[in-house]
Amino acid sequence: MSSTLTVYLLNLADLTAVVGSADEKLLDQILTSEPEVLLLGFERDDQDDHVERNKEALRKILAGGPFEEEHAAHYGEALQLICEELAGPGYSGVEFEMWDEGLPSVIETLASSMDNEDPFPNAPALAESLSVSEDNGWGHLSAEECIEILGHGLEQRLAEDPDYLDGYGEPILVWLRESRTSGKDLIGFWNA
């Protein structure tokens, strides 16, 4: 099944600070968005219901819970909406096959669902519920990790062989360079 990855330049600490913050201004900014924004640009058969579930997920994230596993996909979309609001439009459109053997490690990490990590110290149940979603997920690379990856000769390797990383090289290089320039982390969201 093909998935789409969208990457945002945003420090993970800025995202985690929102969880349980009760930031009414941020909530209002997102809730008053057009329905297609609240659907993250995806067309769905149950559009109205999906919009309402994403709005409820946003409210729960900003309230710090409670979180139920059956709404994991909506929490993932709500976190992506929060990133969109805090960081602006992400770099989108990279399509890939989940768990493809040749998938570059950068994409695997940005689509990892934060395996074995608990980025939400104030709401551990959120991380638990996000890990069960089969429709979407997310991952993170710190700004330091991005600099380290660039330091291992990725730019030169791609200049010598543009097909290196199976055609994913160009967007990965853009993301890593932007992270290095801005000093911000990369947060990625995939949707099936």
Image (spheres, rainbow, N blue to C red):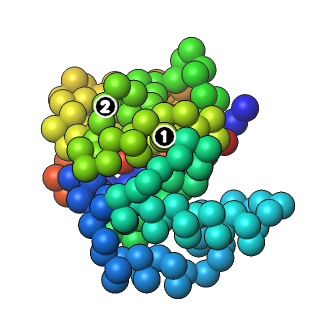
State the residue at coordinates (65%, 69%).
51
Q: Nearer the viewer, residue 75 or 12?
A: 75
Give the image location of residue 41, x and y in percent: 65, 65
Label 2 vs 1, first from the N-terminus: 2
Which quadrant holds residue 88? bottom left
Residue 35 in view of the camera: yes
How far apart are the alpha carbons under marks 2 and 1? 13 Å
Left or right: residue 13 compared with residue 133: left
**Mark seen at residue 102:** none
- The three-letter code of the residue at mark 2 reads Glu
State the residue at coordinates (48%, 34%).
131
Residue tagged by mark 2? 117
Q: From what the image shows, is residue 181 above or below residue 106?
A: below
- Residue closest to the far right: 45
Q: Nearer the viewer, residue 170 or 35?
A: 35
Query: Mark 2 or mark 1: which is in front?
Result: 1
Q: From what the image shows, is residue 109 above or below residue 49?
A: above
- Residue closest to the far front: 66
State the residue at coordinates (30%, 61%).
20
- The three-letter code of the residue at mark 1 reads Ser
Residue tagged by mark 1? 129
Q: Dot 1 surroundings within 10 Å: few (below 14), some, or many (20 or more)? A: some
Left or right: residue 2 compared with residue 166: right
Q: Dot 2 surroundings within 10 Å: few (below 14), some, or many (20 or more)? A: few
User: Where is the N terminus found, in terms of image quarters?
Assistant: top right
SS of the residue under disc 2: loop
Q: Nearer the viewer, residue 34 or 51?
A: 51
Give the image location of residue 61, x and y in percent: 41, 60
Give the image location of residue 81, x and y in percent: 47, 64
Residue 83 in view of the camera: no
State the residue at coordinates (27%, 67%).
21
Left or right: residue 22 compared with residue 70: left
